[in-house]
Amino acid sequence: MLTIKNDRVIDASGHTLKTLSCPRRILDSDLENPHHAESRCTHCDRNVINTDYLTEAQIIARLKEDPTTCLKINRFNPIFRVLDQEPQNGI
Amino acid sequence: MEFNVNYDRSYNAPRIVKTVFDLEEANTYISEGRIVLFKSVKTNRKLYSKGYLFKHRQTGQCRIEQARQFPIQYAGWEELSEDEWEQILPVKDYARARTLEHDWAGYVLPLEPRLGEIFYIEDLIEDIFVSEFWGSKIYAVDGIASWNGSELKLRRDLYRSSECYIVG
C-alpha cells in the first residue's frame, strides 16, 4: 500500500517516492481525456497518469524512473491510504 | 462506497442536523421546540448498477456481471461466452442501503437556528452520486448546508467527482 501524507507519496518501507506539488486544484475538466490511462493537462501540457489503471508496483516503478511524474489518484483506490488531507472547501 | 464530505469542521464547528426515520422520534423533537424538515427519500438512478445474472451451463454456478464482455482492473477484458454461460435475467443493484419500510425521513435542526447558519448533516436523506471506482458507485453520506429560514441549502459543490481525486 502507498501512503499519502503531507502531500508526499510514501511506499511501504517509508521512502518518499514523490511530492504532490501541483499549485493548481486540477479538475477533470482540466484534463483532455480525464478517464483515460494518461491525459494531457491543459494548464501545463504535461501528461497526467491515471493511477486507477496501474498496479502498486507499476506506480512505484514509474515514480522511481521519474519522481516528477504527475499522478491522478482516486481516494477510493485501495492501493492508497490518504492521511491528513487538508480540507480545501471550508467557508 | 461511502463518501464523506471534505470540509474542515474543527474551525467554527457547525452544529449538527440529525436525521430521523421514525415519526414518534420526530414528534418528540418537535415537542422540544425543534424544527423537523420532512423530505421524501428518493432513489437516484445514477446509483444503480445494471447487469445480468449468468449461469454456467455445466456447473450451474451463477455470477452477476455488467455484460458478457466487461473490463477487469489491470487485466483488460473478460468475456463470458454463450457456449459456457447462459444469460438468465437482467438485474440491478443499488449502491446505498435503503429501507423499504418508509419513503420519508426528517432533518432535525438544532434549537433556534440562525438565518445563514451553516450546519453539518450527519446522515443525508438525499441520495447523491459522487463518482465511481472501477464500476463501484461512490455516494455521499453526509453534508454541509445553510439555513435560509425555511430550507436547508446543501453545498452541492462538495460532491464534485474531483473531490475524490488528488492530482499532482
Image (spheres, rainbow, N blue to C red):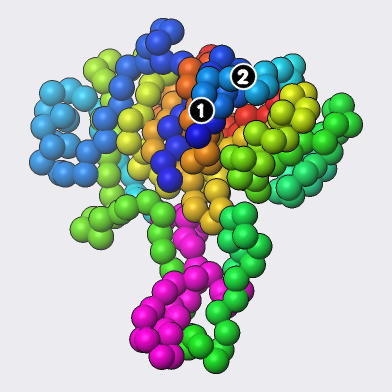
Q: Which image quarter is the N terminus of chain B in?
A: top left
Tag 2 residue: A16
In this rendering, the answer to whether A44 lies above or below B21 is above
Using the rendered image of the protein, determine whether residue A29 is visible from the camera's viewpoint: no
Residue at the location (45% across, 81% down)? B54
Q: Chain of mark 1?
A: A
Chain for mark 2? A
Residue drawn where x is 57% and y is 23% of the image: A10
Residue B13: percent from left, percent from top: 37, 11
Residue B102 visible in the snapshot: yes
- Whether A46 is drawn above or below B77: the answer is above
Above-or-below relation of B18 to B94:
above
Amino acid marked by disc 1: Ala
* Image coords of residue A67 (percent x, y): 74, 24
Residue at 60% over, 24% down:
A9
Side (left or right) of B26 relative to B97: left
Residue B145 occupies which quadrant of the picture? Answer: top left
Which dot marks residue B101? none
**Residue for badge 1:** A12
Q: Is residue B46 left or right of residue B100?
A: right
Q: In the rendered structure, which amino acid carries the disc numbered 2?
A: Thr
Q: What x and y, as percent, mark residue B61?
A: 36, 81
